[in-house]
Image (cartoon, rainbow, N blue to C red):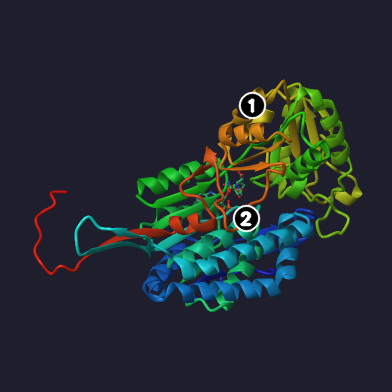
Amino acid sequence: MSTRRRYRNYIDGEWQETETGNWAPNINPANTKDVIGELPLSSKGETEMAITAAERALPGWRAIPAPERGRLISRAHRLMTERTDELARSLTREEGKILPEAKGEVQKTLNILEFMAGEGMRLDGDTMPSELANTFAYTVREPIGVVGAITPWNFPVAIPGWKIAPALVAGNTVVFKPASLTPETAELVVGMFVEAGLPRGVLNLVYGSGSMVGQTIVEDPRVKALSFTGSNEIGAGLYVDGAHRLKKVQCEMGGKNPVLVLEDADLELAVEGTVQGAFGSTGQRCTATSRAVVVDDIADDFVGRVVEYASGIVVGDGLTAETGMGPSVDQSQYDTVLEYIEIGKQEGAECLAGGEPLTGPEHADGYFVQPTVFDRVDPDSKLAQEEIFGPVLAVIRVPDFETGLEVCNNTRYGLTSSIYTADNSRAFRFIRGIETGITHVNSPTMGGEAQLPFGGTKATGVGMREMGKTAIDFYSEWKTVYIDYTGEKRESLFY
Ligand code: NAP
């Protein structure tokens, strides 16, 4: 029998052992000899038990006034504030991002909880004048019901936070299936909501494979809404499956985010922003900068500086103070990154920095790849078109702003973008013309604040935006109310 820490499902107010007897290891990507724990591979039946519990808890939870539901989120916020260090260390150990980034992710989650707690006080509707005399017309928000939240490994604290908190505040109950690569942070996050005082069944956590636990959540008719973040490969199928069953579905998926650097940009600012965007979190952010579109006049200077920065990044275990970039999350992601580096070389792009795995003694047990910069990348090549999700930057040279904007939009994705320029006119033309859900001027492609909508266009996102007030729009239904206080029969309106 294993002595490793075993995570448990949280179903109907109880931490429960899985009945299947099947487990998968939780491995530290910086040191694969460090097996952190084991997650249960739960069954369809266990997932259905969680859905049953969520359905049973719904009437009681939705009857609690929204400000009170918000206060519960505030208590989870307080617990998370106290345990920031523990949560951040767990996150670094199982996902690989460096500790300051892990702390940054926890801080972002705290901001989300703070904002969503306040939404409990604001769950607003509209009052509209009725066409009829002596009639009061207004709208009120209602919960959708049981919500399924399916999340990826790359932001395993923030993304569950930005799904679970608004779903609960809006009066829904939740079945949460976290990514299998990051089970410990899921347990910690759910534990904080539980300790904050959630009634039994309101939030349920089920570990296991996407094809079993995830698919059961998608298919069960009692689950009325699905919020998914992850790859296009899985999200596209889930969207069809959910829509076919008339569920409300939201999918946030891949990206290929560009930064456009013009000749009048503050070059140092642009270089720093591009390097942060490309290599921060090992390029494993949905908002990572994967394409730098640079006008010819300054391209040599820009590329020279980016290469210098990239070559100076210390790659290693994210728990070590001097580390600037951690590992890829697992063998499969590591193989994918190396495969794309090979594709880039074969496509004829110039590899000016990195381009190799790190295999020395201090890197031997982790999934480490050098920060990699390709120059003179063809905008139609695979390197420029496909999501890599690793520390690989493709520089594309363009003659001018107009071509640059076209190249930025030459992708199926549309999550985020950025322009570096001192020219307001071109900055505004970029804002108008760029086909992304989020855009930045003179700052990196990454980031997103709790009070503002987050999500993408084109193949990146379908359904309503996450975070901000728009999250509440996704997690609630509108009810329109007409109150006739004439007390008399009216002529028919015929519509
Ligand atoms: P993924 O492989 O698509 O997995 C996402 C989640 O879906 C995991 O919990 C996974 O479970 C589950 N899943 C897998 N197959 C399923 C199925 N058949 N039915 C239901 N659920 C299923 O994505 P990932 O590798 O974890 O995350 C990386 C991707 O997320 C990247 O493409 C990135 O761009 C995207 N992302 C997008 C955003 C955004 O806001 N646009 C934010 C962050 C990440 P298992 O873990 O058990 O396989």
Give the residue drawn at x 85%, y 43%: 358
Cβ at disc 1 under 8 Å from ligand 1: no
Give the residue drawn at x 52%, y 40%: 457
Residue 360 in the image: x percent, y percent? Answer: 90, 45
The answer to which of 423 and 483 lies nearer the viewer is 423
Q: Residues within 10 Å of mark 1 (few under 14, many from 20)?
A: many
Q: Is residue 219 left or right of residue 130?
A: right
Q: Residues within 10 Å of mark 2 (few under 14, many from 20)?
A: few
Work out whether 454 lies above or below 25.
Answer: above
Element type at mark 2: loop
Q: Marks 1/2: CA distance?
A: 27 Å
Q: Quadrant of the N terminus?
A: bottom right
| Amino acid residing under circle 2 | Glu
Which sits earlier in the primary sequence, circle 1 or circle 2? Answer: 1
Work out whether 415 lies above or below 480.
Answer: above
Mark number, residue 407: 1
The answer to which of 209 and 66 lies nearer the viewer is 66
Work out whether 419 lies above or below 169.
Answer: above
The image quarter in which residue 40 lies: bottom right
Give the residue drawn at x 36%, y 57%: 221
Cβ at disc 2 under 8 Å from ligand 1: no
Residue at the outermost front position: 133
Q: What residue is disc 2 on? A: 449
Element type at mark 1: helix
Residue 123 in the image: x percent, y percent? Answer: 44, 65
